[in-house]
Image: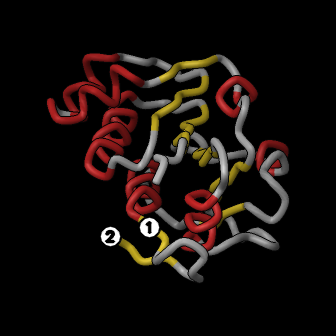
Amino acid sequence: MKQREIRFVLNRPKRSENIGAAARALANTGAGELWLVAPRAWDQEVAAKVATRGARHVLDAMRVVDTLDEALAGCIDVVMTSGRSLRGALHPSQAAQRLVLAPGPVGLVFGDEQNGLDNLTLRRASVGCQCFWRAARTSHALRASANLRPTAPGAAGCSSG
């Protein structure tokens, strides 16, 4: 079965430590690629210390772009996360199922560590594909989402792994 292209997009992250933690989470799960949109105060050495040696390949392959449009170019489906209750939001397992079973590139977008994604950005998600995560840190939410796996092609629900 062909590996799916899942882009884990950090939109305007503020802390290099969180970028490193996100890289470590993706290295541990092999769930997808790390993309950064307009990072603030980006320090590769700080991120690398948090990521550890085992995640260096994720940082090396990471894409850094100026706009969310660039990060999501070519994606056929997009899930945006929010710590706020949103009407029509998917449960994380439903969002994971949708992304993993998509027939092409997809994006999972996380907002900055302090404010998350604003309402205007959240409206850009694919229809019915806003996701509700309550997590203290972006890297924790990313790790939780990267660990979600569909139970089987076409099956309902996901299991954490």
**Which residue is pictured at 28% across the width and 27% down the height?**
57
Q: 53 or 103, which lies in front? A: 103
- Which badge, 2 or 1, is on the more N-terminal residue? 1
* Label 2 – label 1 distance at C-alpha: 7 Å
Q: Position of residue 14 (x, y in %)?
A: 49, 30
Is residue 79 visible in the rendered structure shown here? yes
Q: Badge 1 local density, few (<14 within 10 Å), some, or many (20+)? A: some
Disc 1 designates what residue? 149
Which SS class for mark 2?
A: loop
> At label 1, which amino acid type do we have?
Arg
Q: 117 or 56, which lies in front? A: 56
Q: Position of residue 40 (x, y in %)?
A: 52, 21
Which SS class for mark 1?
A: strand
Farthest left residue? 53
The vertical placement of 83 against 111, above or below, is below
Tell me the quarter of the picture where residue 62 sits.
top left
**Which residue is pictured at 19% across the width and 28% down the height?**
49
Disc 2 designates what residue? 161
**Which residue is pictured at 31% across the width and 52% down the height?**
29
Is residue 115 visible in the rendered structure shown here? no
Q: Is residue 151 left or right of residue 107?
A: left
The vertical placement of 79 against 63, above or below, is below
> At label 2, which amino acid type do we have?
Gly
Q: Position of residue 140 (x, y in %)?
A: 39, 56
Q: Quadrant of the C terminus?
A: bottom left
Farthest bottom residue? 156
**Which residue is pictured at 62% across the width and 47% down the height?**
116
Q: Is residue 51 left or right of residue 41?
A: left
